[in-house]
Image (cartoon, grey):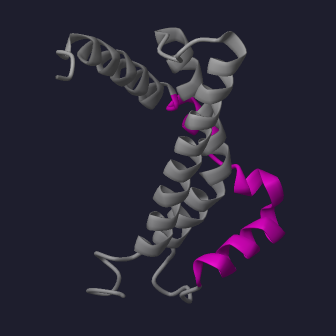
Amino acid sequence: AEYMGGLLYGGLGSALLGVGTSWAVYYYFYALFKQWLAKKYKRSGNSTVMNLLVAMGSGVISAIISNPIWVVNTRLKLKKKDEPDVSFWTALKKLAREEGIGGLMSGVVPSLILVTNPAIQFAVYEKLKAVLLMLQPPAR
């Protein structure tokens, strides 16, 4: 699936894998942490601080797990034209073999800092949802 020499679709497969993995991991741990905290503290899970902590924890785990995918995706997109095309999996194995954990986790610190943005968004979303549900008239 290459169009115009990879100008439009180069790296699309690995980008979709990265997005899918990132959000799947994020939502899985978001739900898991909310349930765990609700049971542990006998609360509904609608505390703004609790939602912020849950979102940050989920984001950290998602960033760490998906980081190798994004490193490979970036390197595949930045490869020189004279370099042979390789699959995502081949590039991932080569990265792990040649650079180890340091290469796989390259750039993870900025990703961890950027976790704060969606964490704030999710905490605000949860608070607005709770407020709107309280304002909703009772069902008839």
Image position, residue 117 (x, y; %): 43, 27
Camera sees residue 78: no
Question: Closest to the observer: 22 or 72?
Answer: 22
Residue at x 53% of width, y 28% of height: 55
Give coordinates of residue 103: x percent, y percent: 73, 56
Q: Quadrant of residue 135?
A: top left
Q: How many marks?
A: 0
Magenta highlight: main SS = helix
- Name the residue at 67% across, 44% down: 64
> Viewer-proximal residue, 13 or 5?
13
The x and y percentages for residue 16 are 44, 66
What residue range appears in magenta? 87-115
- Residue 97 shown in magenta: yes
Compared to 128, does 62 lie above or below?
below
The image quadrant of residue 11 is: bottom left
- In this rendering, position of residue 31 left or right of residue 89: left
- Residue 133 counted in the magenta span: no
46, above or below 119, in the image: above
Residue at point 56% right, 36% down? 31
Q: Is residue 118 visible from the viewing direction of this image?
A: yes
Q: Position of residue 61 (x, y in %)?
A: 66, 39
